[in-house]
Image (tube, grey):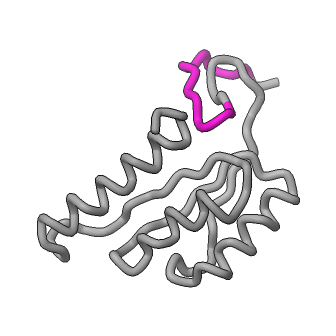
Amino acid sequence: MTLRQNTRKIRIGNRVIGGGNSVAVQSMLSVPSTDIAGSVAQAKALEAAGCEILRAAIPDMDAIPLIETIKKETVAIPAIMIKIISIQKQSLNRYVYILAQIVLFVNSIRGQV
């Protein structure tokens, strides 16, 4: 039997992970982030299958609309948006815009907005 390590508790939306809580079922969307309808459909299917935390990549400016759509049209489970764009590929203004959108989204799932 493997013993679990003692870790810090972290709240993601209404779910708490770590600190002795049960393991959360997580999944990452595999549909391209620019395919909004496909991403929403996959998110709903993952929720129906028991997924408790949803992750999605935001690789470029074209994927930004996915953040708001996932928040409004899809599942009740918390979502984490992962920014994977390199600052060398974008101007600083675009980088700041993407970062601001991610911060707003994270705050919204924490109930701070």
Q: Is residue 3 left or right of residue 101?
A: right
Residue 4 part of the magenta-drawn span = yes
In front: 6, or 88? Answer: 88
Residue 79: image location, x then y, percent: 59, 51
Q: Quadrant of residue 12?
A: top right
Residue at left 22%, top 63%?
95
Determine which quarter of the picture holds residue 82.
bottom left
Decide: is 105 above or below 31.
above
Where are the magenta residues, as a range?
A: 3-15
Q: In the figure, 14 relative to 83: above or below?
A: above
The spot of residue 9 in percent (x, y) is: 58, 21
Q: 2 left or right of 17?
A: right
Instruction: Say which quadrant the N terminus sits in.
Output: top right
Q: Does 94 sit left or right of 5 as displayed?
A: left
Whether residue 38 sits left or right of residue 12 in the image: it is right
| Total tally of numbered discs in the picture | 0
Taking depth in this image into account, of 21 and 13 the one nearest to the observer is: 13
Looking at the image, is 106 positioned above or below residue 7?
below
Report the residue at 52% width, 70% height from top. 66
Residue at image position (54%, 19%) is 8
Write down the quadrant of residue 27 in the picture: bottom right
- Counting from the top left corner in percent of width and height, residue 85 is at 31, 68
Question: Residue 14: x and y, percent?
Answer: 67, 33
* Main SS, magenta residues: loop
